[in-house]
Each structure stands twice: as C-alpha cells, then as structure tokens.
Amino acid sequence: MGETARRIDGKASAARIVAEVKAAAQALRSETGTQAGLAVVIVGEDPASQVYVASKAKMATECGFKSVKHVLPADTAQEDVVALVRDLNADPTIHGILVQLPLPEGIDETAVVQAIAADKDVDGFHLLNVGRLSTGARDEAFVPCTPAGSMILIREVLGDDLSGLAAVVVGRSNIVGKPMAQLLLAANATVTIAHSRTKDLAAVCRAADILVAAVGRPQMLGADFVKPGAVVIDVGINRIPAPEKGEGASRLVGDVDYAAASAIAGAITPVPGGVGPMTIALLMANTLVSAYRMSGRTPPRF
Ligand code: GUN
C-alpha cells in the first residue's frame, strides 16, 4: 500500500502563526507599552502535563510575552487553586490564564476553570466562551486551541467555505469534539458528532469528506474508516511501546492508523508534527488577542 495523501505539515503552519504572533506582540508593545502576559498553572506531577506546560511557558517567552508558571503540589486544596486563579484574574500584567487539565483527584475542575475570568480564558473553556462560540460571537470568544488549530489546517487544504462537505468528528469532549463541531458548522459543513456508542462507526466515518479523530485510542481508525480523498485530522497523541527502538522505548501515534489511512485519504495530519504544534501556536495567538482586546486594539485574525 503506497502513500498517496498530502501530508499536512502542522509544524510549518504553527511556525508561521508563531512568527505572526511574535511580530504583533512586538508591535503592541512598542505602540502601547503593553507586553502580553500568559500564566500557566499546573497542580501535581503528571509527567505528560509537566512537559506540555513547560513547552507552553517556553513558547510564550519566545513570543516575547511575560511568561509565568505556577507549579502547585498535588495535595493543594481546591480553594487555594481558586485563590491563585483570582489573583491572576486581578493582575493587569496577565492577559491569558491556563490551568492545565486534568487536575488531581479531589479538585473540582469545573469550579477551577469557571473561576478564570472569561476575558482571560485563553483555553476557551469558560461557559461564556463556550456560549459565544456556539452562538457565533466569534469576535468576543476564545476558541479552544486544539480545534482552532485543526480548523486552520482544514482551511489550508479546503479553503474557508466548507459548503456541501460532510464532516465527521469522532469524540465528544468539551475540549475538542464539541468545539470542533461548532467550528465546522460555522464554516458551513454538514456535521456529525460520532463517539464510542455510535453504531457502525466505520461506516459513519467513511461518509466524511472531513474526518476529525479525537478519541484518545491509538491507531483506532484504520483504512475502512476513510473515504477516498478525505481530509483527515488526527488529534490523538498516544504513547505506545516501541520494542523495535529498544527495550522500554516508546513512540507517539495518533488515533488514526497513518500508514493505512494515508493510502486512501487526500490529505492527512501526521503524529507527531500535525495538530500538536498548532495547539500551542493557537494558545499564543489567543493570548495575543487577549492583550490586544484589553488594550482597546483590534486584534489580528488567525
Ligand atoms: N490538557 C489537555 N489538553 C489541554 C488543553 O488544551 N488545555 C488545558 N488547560 N489542559 C489540557
């Protein structure tokens, strides 16, 4: 089986966005004196989360932002996490606040996330931002970074108007599946949200001109899930054992079986190097947009 699909280079697209963010941050700073600021909060020692948070903080610095990282021990009381969030809400040098999920057991994620001021909620998880996205108030909303980044990759292949195209989103999470469906709908696609309880998932997916996989199960979507010529966006990042690389070694794979799907799809994102780098780039873009809004300036569009 040969590879025929175009490989969608998320790394290159992300680098372009980061360069735009950097330039716009510099312009804002020289014209208004405002330096965009991002605060990331992590509670506990989950190793994958540590890596993600470190790369978010580092990228913020590279963009010329003020970058603050708060690391709290796993046994921190919920009210202390909320108190930190409230301090950041009140801090005029901070334009974006991100609390890394999942939070340790015993802390109510909803209580913490909803404590973030909606106008600093660069993750787009606050109910106000969820409502803004679903009602079409895009200019006031923050859109969750992974779906926003995925949408940019889709637009690069298919353009801004998805009229007449069938989109299937596999996964119904608040972070990816649901906002992804909203974005596709706003771009005029005909949208289906499929999930673990969907009957004959492969057949549903095979009807998709645009297939977005966000299920969190390694290489679950094989060749029989892909319509010839489809645009396949693989949101999954799964670490699996790779004994061929040596004892104890591992590698990252998506929710799509890349080798199988790329023989059939028209375009497909790889893992790594697809959606992953876009997520972090869009976090920078959202933070920049927040700083522009708070300075009374019209932000750039991404
Ligand atoms: N954990 C996994 N993805 C995300 C994300 O996009 N934002 C936050 N805050 N935590 C996450």
Image (tube, rainbow, N blue to C red):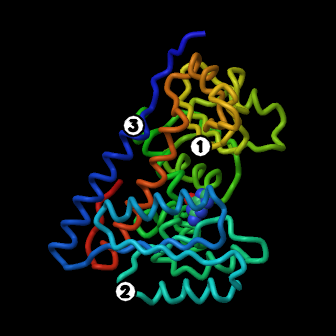
Q: Point out which mark residue 292 bears.
A: none
Residue at the disc numbered 3: 156
Q: Is mark 1 within 8 Å of ligand 1?
A: no
Q: Position of residue 10 (x, y in %)?
A: 43, 39
Residue at 73%, 40% (x, y): give it: 217
State left or right for residue 155 relative to residue 239.
left
Q: Residue furthest front?
A: 247
**Mark 2 neighbour class, 10 Å CA radius: few under 14, some 14 to 19, many 20 or more:** few
Marks 1 and 3: which is nearer the front? 1
Q: Is mark 2 within 8 Å of ligand 1?
A: no
Marks 3 and 2 close (CB-CB < 8 Å): no
Single out the residue that lies furthest toward the left: 31
Q: Secondary structure at mark 3?
A: helix
**Who is closer to the viewer here, 25 or 227?**
25
**How far separated are the C-alphas under marks 1 and 3?**
17 Å
Distance from disc 1 to disc 2, alpha carbons, whole Å, reads 34 Å
Instruction: Using the image, determine if residue 137 lies above or below residue 7.
Output: below
Ligand 1, image quadrant it occupies: bottom right
Residue 210, visible in the rendered structure: yes
Q: Earlier in the sequence, mark 1 or mark 2?
A: 2
> Is 160 left or right of 85, judged from the image as shown?
left
- In the rendering, which numbered label is found on residue 235? 1
Among all residues in the image, which is located at the extreme top? 1
User: Disc 2 marks which residue?
Assistant: 92
Q: Give the residue drawn at x 73%, y 33%.
A: 220
The amino acid type of the residue labelled 1 equals Val
Where residue 300 sits: x, y (%)?
29, 60
Q: Is residue 134 visible?
A: no
Q: CA distance from mark 3 to mark 2?
A: 36 Å
Q: Position of residue 229 (x, y in %)?
A: 54, 21
Crowding near pointer 3: few (<14 within 10 Å), some, many (20+)? few
